[in-house]
């Protein structure tokens, strides 16, 4: 018997294979999430998170301020000097830093050879921290599977542009073109869908 689909999730018919050869069924959230939980509607943009951090930099309730001026203590915007896992400098990562990149551009930090949120038991995964249970941010391989096994159409849902992702089993999700935050502003809303994976870039450690 198939397992019960978790509340707030959609069965997109994707089966993934682990490194040990075992398999698992992958479910996707039916909406984005904010620091309060899953968004009420699929077209809601949700909150903006820095990679590997579990709360937004701005004060709760200011997700769509553009530009934003209401920052949490210790944050000045989405800059490197606000980022938790570096020493005020993108050349000095203090987490998720490969040993073989310590002499390269963007790798002179504290090497731990960790590349995935699972390496720290999802302590840096915003989805796990906020939604609890087995929720987590997808890996790069899982995003690739969603891209390869589903049909993507750019549509408008209640005035919000984004991708309708249609699975072969007939189920679908909507991924809003939420853009991204850079410094104090939101960029490319309606033009690009920028979403993190839980996988850091092993070639360029300051990317994910």
Image (tube, grey):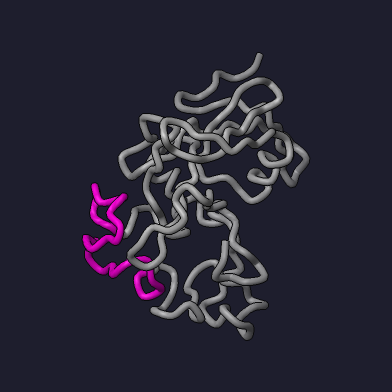
Using the image, determine if residue 104 lies above or below residue 66.
below
Residue 174, image x and y in percent?
52, 33
177 and 204: which one is in front? Answer: 177
Picture coordinates of residue 119, whole percent (x, y)? 56, 56
Of 43 and 204, the residue lying toward us = 43
Q: Residue at x 51, y 28 (%)?
A: 9
- Left/right placement of residue 142 relative to residue 117 reads right
Give the quarter of the image for residue 78.
Answer: bottom left
Is 26 drawn above or below residue 80 in the view shown?
Answer: above
Viewer-proximal residue among 60 and 108: 60
Point out residue 55 in the picture as x, y percentages from the top left corner: 34, 53
In the rendered image, residue 164, in percent from the top left (x then y), is placed at: 58, 33
Left-right relation of 148 to 173:
right
Residue at 57% across / 45% down in the picture? 138
Tell me the quadrant of the picture where the C terminus can be found. bottom right
- The answer to whether residue 77 is magenta is yes
Tell me, yes or no, whether the highlighted magenta stretch contains residue 186. Answer: no
Q: Main secondary structure of the magenta part?
A: loop
| Residue shown at 71% from the left, 32% from the top | 15
| Image height of 12 relative to 137, above or below | above
Q: Quadrant of residue 206?
A: bottom right
Magenta stretch? 58-82
């Amino acid at each position: 018997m198939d397992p019960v689909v978790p509340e707030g999730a959609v069965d997109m018919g994707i089966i993934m294979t682990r490194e040990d050869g075992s398999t698992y069924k992958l479910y996707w959230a039916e909406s984005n999430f904010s620091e309060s939980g899953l968004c009420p509607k699929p077209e809601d943009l949700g909150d903006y998170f820095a990679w590997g951090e579990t709360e937004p930099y701005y004060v709760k309730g200011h997700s769509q301020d553009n530009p934003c001026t209401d920052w949490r203590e210790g944050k000045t915007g989405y800059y490197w000097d606000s980022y938790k896992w570096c020493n005020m400098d993108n050349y000095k990562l203090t987490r998720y830093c490969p040993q073989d990149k310590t002499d390269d551009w963007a790798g002179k930090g504290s090497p731990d050879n960790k590349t995935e949120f699972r390496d720290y038991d999802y302590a840096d995964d915003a989805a796990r921290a906020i939604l609890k249970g087995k929720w987590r941010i997808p890996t790069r391989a899982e995003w690739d599977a969603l891209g390869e096994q589903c049909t993507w159409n750019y549509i408008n849902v209640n005035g919000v542009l984004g991708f309708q992702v249609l699975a072969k089993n007939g189920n679908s999700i909507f991924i809003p073109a939420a853009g991204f935050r850079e410094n104090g502003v939101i960029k490319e809303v309606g033009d690009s869908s920028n979403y993190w994976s839980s996988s850091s870039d092993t070639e360029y450690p300051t990317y994910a």
